[in-house]
Image: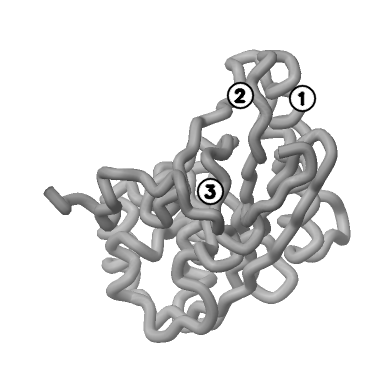
Amino acid sequence: SCTGEFPCWPTTLITENEAMPPYIYLASQSPRRQALLGQMGQHFELLLPDPSEDVESLEATQAGESPRDYVQRVTALKLASALNRWRLRGLSLAPILCADTTVALGDAILGKPQNRQHARDMLSALSGKTHVVFTAIAAGTPTEMRHALSVSQVRFAAWSPGEIEAYLDSGEWDGKAGAYAIQGRAASHIAHIEGSYSGIMGLPVHETAELIKPPWKGL
């Protein structure tokens, strides 16, 4: 049945479509990215980090770095880390897909909030304003790298303090760049978007389909 916050996708995955590889590796724990790939009909296997990997350090910001440069650098680091993971595990050859999403208010990078107060501050800053959502994607094998960037604009209506607290109570902000999820309760506060809805969710479907399209060198 089609319930929950994500749309349903075909139970039979498309594996003979020449526009898509037979399968790819997805190096992301995000259920939203997994759902969007499934919605595309793209078969994938998860390539997740071991507990010993310090993946959080990859998302550290650098002084003076623009949001656009930041999200592309982090995604490239994620792909390099995933390729190393693939080598160490001796897995079969297939393209590896990575992504990173960041919210920018002007030049300020709004990543994942550290706690409830941090999330409150972010939502208060975004209230009644237009911000930019950058999602960078990268796909690669040991012999070929591909990169793309999705840029979208989101305008929030004004949030009252009570509305912010109610949203914080939902817990939806946890682990989300900018402290909100567009596909969840925050949608009722969004007045306008321009760009890619799926990109704002975390994986721009059109750009991803173009990025992973065969042929790949050596495959």
Q: Residue at x 67, y 20 (%)?
A: 53
Residue 19 image position (x, y, % from top left): 55, 58
* Residue of label 3: 113
Residue 207 image position (x, y, % from top left): 60, 65
* Residue of label 2: 49
Residue at the left extreme, as displayed: 1
User: Which numbered disc, 2 or 1, marks the residue closer to the eye?
Assistant: 1
- Of callouts 2 and 1, the N-terminal one: 2
Measured Cα–Cα span from mark 1 to mark 3: 28 Å
The image shows residue 157, relative to residue 147, as above or below, that is below
Q: Residue at x 34, y 53 (%)?
A: 168
Q: In the drawing, does residue 206 fall left or right of residue 1?
A: right
* Residue of label 1: 84
The image shows residue 192, relative to residue 34, as above or below, that is below
Q: Residue at x 53, y 71 (%)?
A: 125
Q: Amino acid at mark 1?
A: Asn
